Image (cartoon, rainbow, N blue to C red):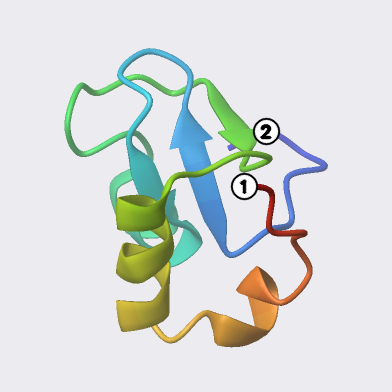
C-alpha cells in the first residue's frame, strides 16, 4: 500500500471503487479488480456517502464540504 495514504477509505485508481483501509490491509489490493494503485478520496457522490456512513465513518465524512 502506498505511503502517505492515511484516510480510512481509499479509491481504486483503476475501477474507482471505494475500499475500506482495513480491506486493503487484508487483501493487499482492490477486491473488485486487483489493482494496487489507490488514492485518498477527495470527491464522492450521495450513494458513496451513504456507504461510508454504513461503515461508521461519520467523523471522516464531517471533514468534507457539501457542494450542491
Q: Earlier in the sequence, mark 1 or mark 2?
A: 2
- Secondary structure beneath disc 1? loop
Count the numbered circles shown. Answer: 2
Residue 48 in percent (x, y) is at 36, 53
Nearer to us in this view, 58 or 5: 58
Nearer to us in this view, 21 or 40: 40
The dot on residue 46 is none
Quickly name the residue at label 1: 68
Q: Residues within 10 Å of mark 2 (few under 14, many from 20)?
A: few
Residue located at (52% from left, 79% from top): 57
Residue 24 in percent (x, y) is at 40, 50
Quickly name the residue at label 2: 2
Residue 56 lies, with reference to residue 34, above or below; the image says: below
Q: Is residue 29 left or right of residue 1?
A: left
Residue located at (63% from left, 71% from top): 61
Nearer to us in this view, 25 or 68: 68
Residue 18 lies, with reference to residue 63, above or below; the image says: above
Q: Residues within 10 Å of mark 1 (few under 14, many from 20)?
A: few
Residue 33 lies, with reference to residue 42, above or below; the image says: above
Residue 66 in percent (x, y) is at 69, 58
Q: Is residue 11 left or right of residue 26?
A: right
Amino acid at each position: 500500500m502506498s505511503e502517505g495514504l492515511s484516510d480510512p477509505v481509499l479509491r481504486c485508481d483503476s475501477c474507482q471503487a471505494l475500499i475500506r483501509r482495513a480491506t486493503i490491509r487484508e487483501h493487499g489490493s482492490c477486491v473488485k479488480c486487483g489493482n494496487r494503485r489507490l488514492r485518498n478520496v477527495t470527491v464522492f457522490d450521495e450513494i458513496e456517502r451513504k456507504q461510508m456512513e454504513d461503515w461508521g465513518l461519520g467523523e471522516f465524512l464531517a471533514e468534507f464540504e457539501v457542494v450542491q
